[in-house]
Amino acid sequence: MIVRVLGSAAGGGFPQLNCACAMCRLARSGAPGVVPRTQTSLAVSADGVRWAILNASPDLRQQVTQTPALHPVPSASVRNSPIGAVVLTNGDVDAIAGLLSLREGFVFDLYAAEPVLEALAENSIFKVLNPDVVTRRALVPGRPIRVLDDLIIEAFVVPGKTALYKETSAPDFGTRPGDTIGLEITQPTKGRRVFFIPSCARVDDALRTRLEGADVLLFDGTLYRDDEMIAQGLSQKTGARMGHIAMSGESGAIAALASTRVARRVFIHINNSNPVLDPASPERRAVEAAGWAIATDGMELRL
Ligand SMILES: [Zn+2]
């Protein structure tokens, strides 16, 4: 299996177009190792020929352009694409807006949990995905599906919240089971297990049990500190309010997963406020000392 990180930043990308925070300024200044990142999306393939896209980021067109494996091949019909499936983990803008760049009439299956399929159905702009060529399929948590013949993908519900544009005044913002899912990706004949969980509000026992023995975990790395957006004057929201567990702290992801056996752990969906984006920062050293890597665009994992 090949897992390619097409984009590794949270919503807004890095640097974010309207942001002059410390990290965004570092990125614009070309500081060593502080590399720009597009918004989070993965490409996964069993054979390197046909690919599934996990989350369609607003930067998807640029990401495909930068990834030769995703280019159309000259020998087939003039219009073609190696992308045969798109799988969504939530309905946030940074996970679905790239669907609008996939409207050019090529055939693919679109998988999402029921609340996200509903959000797409409610937003009439997504009718540009012609149902004659784009088949929408429900992803039912706990029920593995076979994608592109040789990948098995199982969705599972993780703690989270509904997309920002779907929030209501209810205490839980109108969140429903399936608003936020994680994905377990395997191949039928090989035992390797890859997890993609770009949004997760907290780590509970069910998640720890599921992740035990994983080969690769790509996990929500939005914020280093729960209050970092407030501390930097960027927002009034904590990570918890946004549905994202912090990396650090007693109940942060590093501590919560410290005793879970995972061969390779990688933070992805990194917000531009997160100091780990600077390789020279103490926060980056702390994360790496705890056994975590920070995803970059173009990172490739082969299993
Ligand atoms: Zn910024």
Image: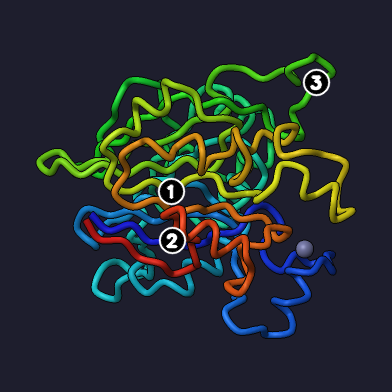
- Tell whether label 1 touches label 2 (CB within 8 Å): yes
- Queried on whether the Cβ of the residue with tag 2 lies below 8 angstroms from ligand 1, the answer reads no
- Tell whether label 2 touches label 3 (CB within 8 Å): no
Q: Is residue 214 left or right of residue 42?
A: left
Quarter of the image that includes the N terminus: bottom left
Give the numbered dot on residue 5. Answer: 2
Q: Is residue 248 above or below residue 266?
A: above
Point out the quarter of the image occupied by ligand 1. bottom right
Label 3 and label 1: CA atoms lie apart by 30 Å
Give the numbered dot on residue 168. Answer: 3
Nearest to viewer (mark 3 / mark 1): 1
Question: Which of these two is toward me, 4 or 124?
Answer: 4
Q: Position of residue 209 (x, y in %)?
A: 35, 25
Mark 3 nearby-residue class (10 Å; few <14, some 14–19, many ≥20): few
Mark sitting earlier along the chain (3/2): 2
Mark sitting earlier along the chain (2/1): 2
Question: Which of these two is toward me, 124 or 241?
Answer: 241
Q: Position of residue 153 (x, y in %)?
A: 31, 35
Q: Quadrant of residue 262?
A: top left
**Type of amino acid under label 2:** Val
Q: Secondary structure at mark 2?
A: strand
**Type of amino acid under label 3:** Thr
Q: Is residue 156 above or below residue 94?
A: above
Q: Position of residue 230 (x, y in %)?
A: 85, 47
Q: Which residue is mark 1?
A: 218
Label 2 and label 1: CA atoms lie apart by 10 Å
Residue at image location 32% in from the left, 21% down from the top: 143
**Type of amino acid under label 1:** Leu
Q: Quadrant of residue 281?
A: bottom right
